[in-house]
Every structure is written in C-alpha cells, then in structure tokens.
Amino acid sequence: MNSTTEKLIERASQLLTKGQSVASTRFNDSSENVIAPDEVNSPLFHEWKNNSQNFILLVCGESSPYYKNFVEGVKSARPSDVDHGIGILKALREDLELGYLTRVRDLVSAEIFTDFIEMAQHLLENSYKDSAASLVGAVLENGLRQIAQKNNIDVKSGDDIGSLNTKLADKEIYNRLLQKQVQAWKAIRDSADHGKFEDYKTEDVKAMLEGVQRFLTENL
C-alpha cells in the first residue's frame, strides 16, 4: 500500500473517531410541555460535517455516490444524521483499504508526477539540461496518456506525444493553442533524445518544465 493511500485511510479513521465523539454529545431538551427531538452539539457537528464533506469530495469527487449521499443525508445536528455520516465514512475507509477507488489512483499518479518534476528541476539546477528535457518529455507523454484514458479516448501502446496530442485536441479536451504548445515541448524532447543538444537552451527547458507542470496540474 502506498503512502498516499495510507494517509487517506488514516484521515478517514480520524474523521470516524471525531464523528463518534460528536455522537456522544447526544442530548434532549424536552420539557413537561414540549417534546423535542434528540440533538448533538451543533458546533462540533458542523466542524465534523465540513471536515468530512471536504475529505469525501477530495477522495471521491463531486459526482460519486459517497459524496452525494453524505450531502443529502448529513444536514442537521441530529444523531440520525451523524450515524448516517459515520456509515458512509466506514464504507469509504473499507474501499480505500481494498483499493477500490479509482480516484485514489489518480492522486497517487499525481504524487509520482510531482516526484519526477522535482527530479527534473534538480537536474536543471545542476546544469543537466539535456537529461532534464528528456525526463520532462517522458512525464508529459505519460500525463497525456492518463488524460486520454480519463476522457475515454482510445490509447494504443505505440502512441507518443504527437499522436496523443492530436487525439486530445481533436476531442476538444483542450484548444488548438495548447496543442501547438505541446508540440513545441515535443520538439525539445525529441532533440534531447536524438542528441541535438544545440537546438535548445537551458532557458527553453526551464520554460518547458514550468509549462508542463502547469499543464498537467490543470488537466490531470
């Protein structure tokens, strides 16, 4: 199990514990003349509710059943709403432990992507512009592949930056201006891979690194 998933499971457990603490504040303000429903501490409830809702949104996305059920079922500072939320968090934690959530794989991919970007940055800072260009190109190609798969675009093993870029632009995943920019990054990567090191400068690789990082952050 990778570190990202472990952190998410740990956070789910923390929110479960917090939810159980909220449930333990149950009280009833009924009087001789008025019968009131059971309630829980309102400030604690809303703090837990917001923490949990944001967590589920991050892990599962807005369109997931987990998120929709939580938003619809956890509204008021009442024991039944807390129990409903705890049940959702338990199910989510179990699916995290069993590796059933595809969005978590996207988060893990993002963590790996960040590691490679940092490696390229280190190479560039130490005057290895050619190795940095090649590495950023590999990160770009892998990222384009993931973007295509995410958008249900057919990807073949032989696809490279050029073909993936064409497929994504043709499907209007991004505009033609971005398509041209991706092609420019491809040209730098190709020059690095084919030993044409004089075709580009350190400044070009630096701009490529920053641009690819921004591009993938916005599209992955």
Image (tube, rainbow, N blue to C red):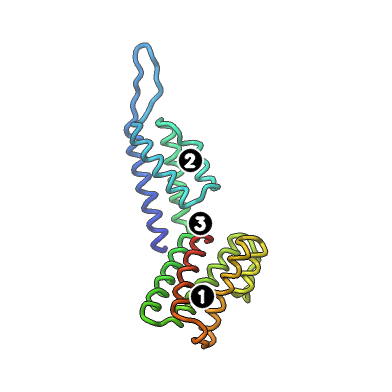
CA–CA distance in space, label 1 to label 2: 39 Å
Where is residue 101 shown, x and y percent of the image? 50, 55
Residue type indicated by callout 2 = Phe
Q: Is residue 29 above or below residue 74?
A: above
Q: Is residue 87 above or below residue 107?
A: above
Three-letter amino acid code of the residue under disc 1: Ala
Gap in angstroms between the C-alphas marked 3 and 1: 22 Å
Q: Which residue is mark 2?
A: 70
Q: Earlier in the sequence, mark 1 or mark 2?
A: 2
Q: Quadrant of the N terminus?
A: bottom left
Q: Residue at x 43, y 31 (%)?
A: 76
Q: Is residue 25 above or below residue 125?
A: above
Q: Position of residue 130 (x, y in %)?
A: 46, 83
In this rendered view, identify the residue nearer to me: 10 or 175.
175
Task: Categorize mark 3 by other alpha carbons within 10 Å: few (<14), some (14-19), many (20+).
Answer: few
Residue assigned mark 1: 138
Tell me the SS state at disc 2: helix
Foreground residue among 55 and 93: 55
How far across and how far down the image is residue 218, in percent?
51, 60
Distance Cα–Cα, label 3 vs label 2: 18 Å
